[in-house]
């Protein structure tokens, strides 16, 4: 027979467990927030594609060459995924989950801006927007007029 009162029982079940350091858990979550956010987004996308393609986690695991338990961890959104794993997911699902920014375009624009800033006096009537359709031909002409060594 249980001699514990309701109040004692309530206190016992509502007090934090001494085995869990909640402050440490919160600190780890904050420390890993950036990759956890990305992992959760990938997990959501994977689950969406699985549903859309009427594929099971087991089938995905077989296509990826991994165990089903690993796929289950992936779709929970708490797995720190490697680029290799993301690539395997993409190939197995036949989709693109991640894109790497194309920095070459921004380098061209930055270089062109640098040329424009250095050679501004030679372009008294410059009138183009970076977003305009004529920006790329303009930048191409600009580079043609000023070889690499003239603006370095």
Image (spheres, rainbow, N blue to C red):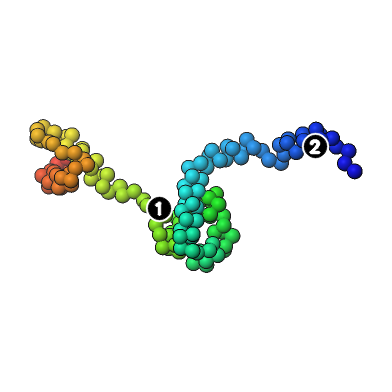
The residue depicted at 55 percent of the width and 65 percent of the height is 58
Q: Position of residue 105 (x, y in %)?
A: 26, 47
The residue depicted at 49 percent of the width and 59 percent of the height is 51
Q: Secondary structure at mark 2?
A: helix
The residue depicted at 90 percent of the width and 43 percent of the height is 1
Q: Position of residue 102 (x, y in %)?
A: 31, 49
- Which residue is most to the right? 1
Query: In front here: 127 or 152?
Result: 127
Left or right of residue 7, residue 136 in this image: left
Left or right of residue 17, residue 147 in this image: left
Kindly identify which residue carries mark 1. Answer: 98
Using a 10 Å C-alpha cutoff, classify the residue at mark 2 as few (fewer than 14 neighbours), some (14 to 19) or many (20 or more).
few
Q: Position of residue 42 (x, y in %)?
A: 47, 52
Task: Judge depth for marks 2 and 1 and give the one in front.
Answer: 2
The label shown at residue 145 is: none
Residue 17 visible at all = yes
Residue 82 visible at all = no
Kindly identify which residue carries mark 2. Answer: 9
Left or right of residue 118, residue 50 in this image: right
Q: Secondary structure at mark 1?
A: loop
Q: Position of residue 61 (x, y in %)?
A: 53, 64
Disc 2 to disc 1: CB gap under 8 Å: no
Mark positioned earlier in the residue sequence (2 or 1): 2
The residue depicted at 41 percent of the width and 63 percent of the height is 94
Query: In front here: 10 or 36?
Result: 10
If the image is split into quadrants, where does the C terminus sit? top left
Using a 10 Å C-alpha cutoff, classify the residue at mark 1 as few (fewer than 14 neighbours), some (14 to 19) or many (20 or more).
few
- Distance between mark 2 and mark 1 Cα atoms: 50 Å
């Amino acid at each position: 027979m249980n001699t514990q009162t309701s109040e004692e029982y309530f206190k016992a079940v509502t007090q934090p467990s001494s085995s869990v350091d909640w402050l440490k858990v919160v600190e780890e979550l904050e420390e890993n927030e950036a990759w956890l956010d990305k992992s959760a987004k990938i997990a959501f996308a994977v689950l969406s594609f699985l549903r859309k393609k009427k594929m099971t986690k087991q089938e995905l695991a077989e296509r990826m060459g991994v165990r089903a338990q690993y796929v289950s961890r992936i779709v929970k959104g708490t797995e720190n995924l490697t680029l290799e794993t993301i690539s395997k997911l993409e190939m197995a699902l036949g989709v693109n989950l991640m894109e790497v920014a194309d920095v070459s375009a921004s380098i061209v624009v930055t270089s062109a801006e640098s040329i424009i800033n250095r050679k501004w006096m030679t372009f008294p009537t410059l009138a183009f927007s970076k977003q305009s359709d004529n920006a790329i031909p303009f930048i191409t002409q600009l580079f043609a007029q000023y070889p690499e060594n003239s603006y370095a």
